[in-house]
Amino acid sequence: MNSGRRDRRVPLSLRRRPVPWHRQEPTWREARPAVIARALKQAQARPSGNWYVVGASEALRRDRPLALDVAGREVVVWRGRDGRPLAGPGICPHLGAPLADSPVRCGTLVCHWHGLALDGGPFAGWQPLPAFDDGVLVWVRLDEAGGEPALDAPVVPERPAAAEGLTAVYTGFGTCEPEDVVANRLDPWHGAWFHPYSFVDLTVVGSPDAADDRFTVDVSFKVAGRLVVPVRAVFTAPGPRTVVMRITEGEGAGTVVETHATPLGSDERGRPRTAVVEAVVATSGRRGFALARRAAPLMRPLMRTAAGRLWRDDLAYAERRWQLRSTGRFPG
């Protein structure tokens, strides 16, 4: 990507001769199933320490818990008196009330059925779970579900400094397994074909081999008409349920998009459900980016909307992949 001589005052470029969608270069030859499968296998072999993403840090308020079914278990997380996260089963040990619906008072989770108060310590068979707040996402550790050697903290990808970034977290749900979400993200070749409203001129300039597990992509983000923002991005999978895209060249260099797939359990028909929790941590060296950070309450809904549009399609991709795998019809 030749970005070194581009006018750094203006991040936009004007496409000279836009190529119609159906005439762009096919990518199916490069998108070899064996390459994607190998990258997926490498990701699944990496340790997670049994940590699962539950949701956004900003969603974990002091007056109410954050709840999610993780690997078929009801889990509830709340902030203790000191602001640190506390976690445990989402079923009240008294008569089974859903603790997800209970308020938090002075760092204590108070069951709304009969007033049983949980301060994060063991009580009547209710056992706390390790929890972690990395400043962007909240995690819980489920050793029984994960079955791996436990780690004291989750493997958190390197991100821009909090004071320099603009963060938004999107959560979506699909009928598939985490591996289907990860496989989708480890297929960068589909970007300009499947998401032409967002990406154009996509070229995968580097894919994993024995010495390098990264996908490197040159792509342009569509703005309006022929206006685009060209960047180089690198995709890696630091864990079995996580894929990270990092912009390495072009506008927003250093920006990170983390995609985390959390298994939820089965629906009423026995089909697996997965939550996609995607954190965008944007950064820029431009002076105007400080204005964007100050306008974060206005920017975050727009960022979540953009992520939601992409994941509407990508979850359909992941669901289709699971459907074919579960019936033995997946190619290869």
Image (cartoon, rainbow, N blue to C red):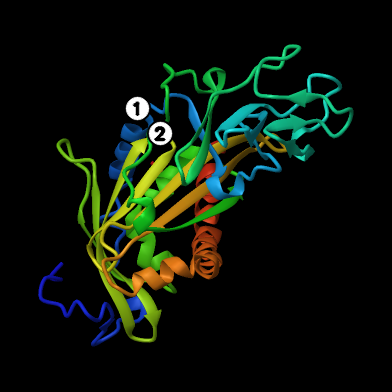
Residue type highlighted by circle 1: Ala
Q: Nearer the viewer, residue 237 or 251?
A: 251
The reply, left or right, for residue 156 in relation to residue 71 is left
In the drawing, does residue 113 fall left or right of residue 125? right
Residue at image position (79%, 33%) is 98
Q: Name which residue type carries label 2.
A: Pro
Residue 37, relative to residue 311: is it above or below? Answer: above
Q: Position of residue 23 (x, y in %)?
A: 32, 77
Location of residue 43 by image quarter: top left
Residue 45 is labelled as 1
Please tell me which residue is depicted at 65% across the width and 42% down the height of the picture. Answer: 62
Mark 1 residue crowding within 10 angstroms, few (<14) / some (14–19) / many (20+): few
Q: CA distance from mark 1 to mark 2?
A: 7 Å
In this view of the protein, which residue sits in the foreground, 156 or 29?
156
Q: Residues within 10 Å of mark 2 (few under 14, many from 20)?
A: many
Q: State the image coordinates of residue 236 (x, y, percent, origin top left).
A: 30, 44
Judging from the image, what secondary structure is the residue with disc 2 in?
Answer: loop
Q: Tell me which residue sits at (71%, 42%) in the image.
A: 64
Q: How many marks?
A: 2
Pinpoint residue 110: horizontal percent, then vertical percent.
Answer: 78, 31
Looking at the image, is 188 positioned above or below residue 289? above
- Evaluate whether residue 195 shows in this view: no
Residue at label 2? 240
Q: Are marks 1 and 2 in contact (CB under 8 Å)?
A: yes
Say which quadrant the C terminus sits in: top left
For the N terminus, the image quarter is bottom left
Closest to the observer: 217 or 257?
257
Residue with the most extreme right position: 114
The residue located at (11%, 71%) in the rendering is: 4
Q: Is residue 293 left or right of residue 228?
A: right
